[in-house]
Amino acid sequence: METYYNPADLKKFGNIGEFQKEFADKFFAYYGAVFAEGALTAREKSLIALAVAHAVQCPYCIDAYSADTLEKGCTEPEMMEAVHVAAAIRGGATLVHGVQMMNKVKELSM
Amino acid sequence: MIKSLKATGNQLADSAFQLTVLRQEVVDVLHLPPFHQKMQEAGLFPLRPVAPAVMQVNVGKMCNQVCKHCHVDAGPDRKEIMTRNTMQLCLDALAQTAIPTVDLTGGAPEMNPDFRWFVEEISKLGRKVLVRCNLTIIVANKKYHDLPEFFKKHGVEVVSSLPFYSADKTDRQRGDGVFDDSIKALKMLNAVGYGQPGSGLVLNLVYNPAGAFMPGPQAALERQFKQALLKDHGIVFNSLFAITNLPVSRFLDYLVESGNYAGYMEKLVNAFNPTAAAGVMCRDTISVGWDGGLYDCDFNQMLDLHVASTSQHIRDFDAQALARRPIVVNQHCYGCTAGAGSSCGGTVA
């Protein structure tokens, strides 16, 4: 079966520098710094990443951060709540534009 | 109830078959370097021992639990039990050395009928005793209820597995009801002073991932466990050891059956850490099998990989010959050298 997404491609992510090394190196250095312990713990960042992975619907990120949050000792309820946070924000972002719709409808309507 | 691989006639109960499966996956399927080659590249082959700090004695494969990840394939059906004669040979060998710690493991070491005698005799030699207690044994039967007092009397360091601070994850790995019984046992240990500040009675917990993933940072996991166990159960302990599951015996079977084998092996190999490799526990540990055979570690023991030395059995214990031996390695060793490394005492890097 042909598919656009191949799980085996996730481990090739580090090879993108083959086409442009300088930016790849800068990106991965930044990435590593972002996920290090800081004002937020690495565990908190991992849960945020899991939520964002669902918001942007990246299957590679979902796989990677499902494993990462498990490794960092997150529970299934914690992980699913993070996904719901993403769902609530995306849903909310959709709905809040409804205010614009309501404004427009009231503008055009008698 | 899960049964041992041996009880179900599973091919993976055979150590030679396990070694074949491990090699085929790493070398033939994944085209990754065999472990000894990785060690050669890191300048660590042959791997040599340092002064022994631990004699780890497996007193038998009988256990009251049948944990999914068990590398011993232990269970109630296993009858391999160390005899008092063999224990005496261990004591005789110990007396010839300055090895400070004896680490008693199994199965459930407490189920060996000579377990208490052995602890008493080791204590008379002035050595520290560490017991790998599965916790549920304390509440399994009335005859074990006084184990906390017995441990206290001999200043035993208790090391116990608890995959998580919730029943769900714990029971999935260790069996139904194990979490609740573990909590009861931990409270009994706390009640006699184990884990309490200033008591000198050390209670350490072991975290094994409940699945095909590596353990996260040990310090962070320890903080989580301490917070949750205190808040939810009023339980205290000293340290948490995060241990990687090695692809041996029942965990290997789980990896194969769940379709996680290739991915897990690849993860272990790609996480090879030369710093962890230099600090592996087999360098300062002598492992003794229930029948007195000598091994570099408990995993090698379960794979029937005897020490590469003329000193093959505890009756022929020769500290100098053992000090000269090359440590026997194989593909399962990638588990101890991945990431922060893994040992019976937690991370090594």
Image (cartoon, coloured by chain):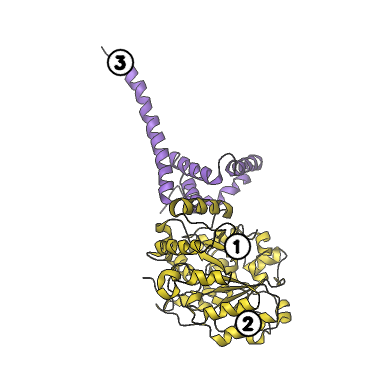
Chain colours: A purple, B yellow
Q: Which of marks 1 and 3 is in front?
A: 1
Do marks 1 and 3 share a subunit?
no
Picture quadrant of residue B179: bottom left
Residue identified by numbered label 2: B91
Q: Which residue lies furthest to the left in this view?
A: A110
In the rendering, which numbered label is found on residue B200?
Answer: 1
- The quadrant holding residue B56 is bottom right
Indicate the quadrant containing the N terminus of chain A: top left, top right, bottom left or bottom right.
bottom left
Q: Name the residue under label 3.
A: A106
**Label 1 to label 3, Cα distance in Å?**
75 Å
Q: Label for residue B30?
A: none
Instruction: Identify which residue is drawn at 57% across, 77% down.
Output: B119
At label 2, the amino acid type is Leu
In the image, residue B138 lies at what x, y percent? 45, 70
Tell me the kind of residue under disc 3: Lys
Residue A3 in the image, given as x and y percentages of width and height: 43, 49
Chain identity of mark 3: A
Label 2's element? Answer: helix
> Nearer the observer, disc 2 or disc 3?
2
Q: Which residue is drawn at 50% across and 54% down?
A: B225
